[in-house]
Amino acid sequence: MRRFFGIAIVLSLVSVAASAQKPPLLPERDVAALAQELSGETAKRNLEGIARFHRQRGSRGFHSAAELVAERARAYGLSDVAILQFPADGKIYYGTQRSRPPWDVEFAELWEMRGGVASVKMGSYDAEPVVLAEDSESADVTADLIDVGEGAKQSDYAGKDVKGKIVLAGAQPGAVQDLAVGKFGAAGIVSYAQNQKTAWWGEDENLIRWGHLETFSSNKTFGFMVSLKTARVLRERLGNGEQIKLHAVVKAGQHPGYTEVVTATIPGADSKLNDEEIAFSCHLDHQRPGANDNASGCVTILEVARTLQKLIIEGKLAKPTRTIRFIWPPEVEGTLTLLNAKPEFAQRIRAVVHMDMVGGGAVTKAVFHVTRGPMSLPSFVHDVGWAFGEFVNEQSYNFAAGLPAECPLVAPEGGKEALLAQDTAYTMGSDHDVYQDSSFRIPAIYLNDWPDRYIHTNFDTAANIDPTKLKRAAFIGAASGYFLASMTTNDLPDVQSQVQHGIDLWKGSIFPRLNSLSAEDAACIDDFRAQYDWGVQLGLLQFVHDTRKEEKPYRTNGQKCLPDREPSNGGDVRYRRKPEPRGPIAVFGSDFVNDRTAAAGITPPKILSYEGLWGSGEEYTYEVLNFVDGLLDAQQIRDRVSAEYGPIPLELVAEYLRALEKIGVLEQVK
């Protein structure tokens, strides 16, 4: 998971009842069949297999994990099992994603030299692959170590001669390499970058964080990762004037190859609807062990696949009318590659259940989220996901509290505590961003843990994964996906009831936000929400091919929420998105906007670093582009993203839209 977690709106924590609640949307017999068959233990056994591999993009380790998933899918009787391959050489683009060349490692060790002899082993790729930063290149270097503090800004190097030396830096290697190696001639990097910040940040000095160099930097080098404990000892010794000499040997590098995506299906039974698909998504790549991030999501959708296929064959579940597809790609770039290289996938998929980190428990300090989609994409599917999430909350709490619970979803080898899932507003950070981008407009239910104190570290191990949590995540996903795959017009009243429940929860949560807004922006929130709710109802009818039309559409897109506001600073300009490139602007390994604005001689838009009340640059830019539809002008787009993430000056939105026009993403509507 690529964490970019803004402030989430928690709409509801748990519904506590003294008597068991009837399950939503699905018949009780279907819910019982799912609950009985889903196995957290089976999922964890598969997780232990995947966690053995260092699963970097395009690498031998990733391919081994892909083969394991494909073998299991075939054994479970799934159809159309395949490992799709797409060329990746650093030159080919798949929409906004520049293909990153695969990266493999033969050998890497870091030693401290004493008396001219390699005496203390500080890191071994064979033992712990996380010690070598991704995209390191081959080297055989013996050099002095020099402390450069964080190492990410030029002032860190003032008065220091780092040429030919190995720098000790607190920042990620990718943030250091162009200065240390490119500008000042360092021979390599040792980094003690800390994990993503949570309440436990920096507490465990033994954690080694997964490190990255910049894939496309011209300043090729190597980077080793060490723990904070090791770094503090090294810094103290250097501060006392001691000379420390290191020997680094690396045999690694990028090479042309393929982006691989595993996929399989459960075919739909309706000849008129089986070309529509409900997809289950995750991401298969990550460092070893990468248990919660994201072997947990991979094995949970694999367990959903096993369970649904088995119950369908046994006649305990009816065949779904729509096809159910399962997808195991590299994070973000694999999904972008798939949807661009195989546009028929994007055309068929009607909704996605995405899982990224779903197995953490008490040890990882995880909080589980059923995350909604962006406001730019009105959809009912999120209410379907939360209906089952709320059901599991109620059942698991009742069980833990000694109250009646027909469906506690407890694994024999797992915990017994309540799930306490949160219904959370849209947050970025994984493949759900790609599906819900305006290029594809595929709504997604996003199941995820946050916080997680071991994310992206050597302590993200299988031992920390709770089989009960895997079973519960699998149930929410399986019930949601199976319902969507079988949904008809007969289900509309029940779904509309869940949608209304979501609206009521939202209204209760929004009042604290209104107090921090101007009267104009508060009015825009109410108006925008009414438009959003109308869009949800329209999408609901379209999903089941109901030909009825709304009697009175909620105003035209061309009308402003506050008609008396005079547009200024380009606020009355409208744009449409060009057919290509497709995908979100924030991708892996390269920066689509900054790369192109630099080439065009344009100053990077200020919105990229803007901090709002509930969101920041990446979220604002994602939604601004999503709202571009040829009908809304810059002022209207500004009003909508302000309702979602907090007020933002119109001139920042207008500047960003002009920049996107200049780099070929948008065109003006005259």
Image (tube, rainbow, N blue to C red):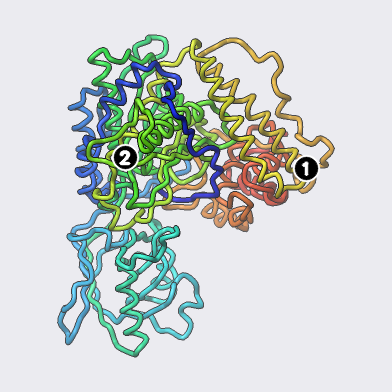
In this view of the protein, can residue 93 be seen by the observer? no
**From the viewer's perspective, is 191 left or right of 515?**
left
Give the vertical position of 78 relative to 319 (above or below). below
Q: Residue at x 27, y 29 (%)?
A: 38
The CA distance from mark 1 to mark 2 is: 48 Å
Q: Nearer the viewer, residue 627 or 516?
A: 516
Of residues 642 and 248, the one nearer the viewer is 642
Dot 1 amino acid type: Glu
Q: Which residue is mark 1?
A: 520
Q: Position of residue 599 (x, y in %)?
A: 55, 55
Quadrant including the C terminus: top right
| Residue type at numbered disc 2 | Lys
Secondary structure of the residue carrying tag 2 is loop
Near mark 1 (Cα within 10 A), the count class, few <14, some 14-19 or many ≥20, is few
Q: Above or below — where is 140 with respect to 493? A: below
Q: Earlier in the sequence, mark 1 or mark 2?
A: 2
Residues 404 and 557: in front is 404
Secondary structure under tag 1 reads helix
* Percent position of residue 441, x then y: 52, 31
Q: Is residue 315 left or right of residue 334?
A: left
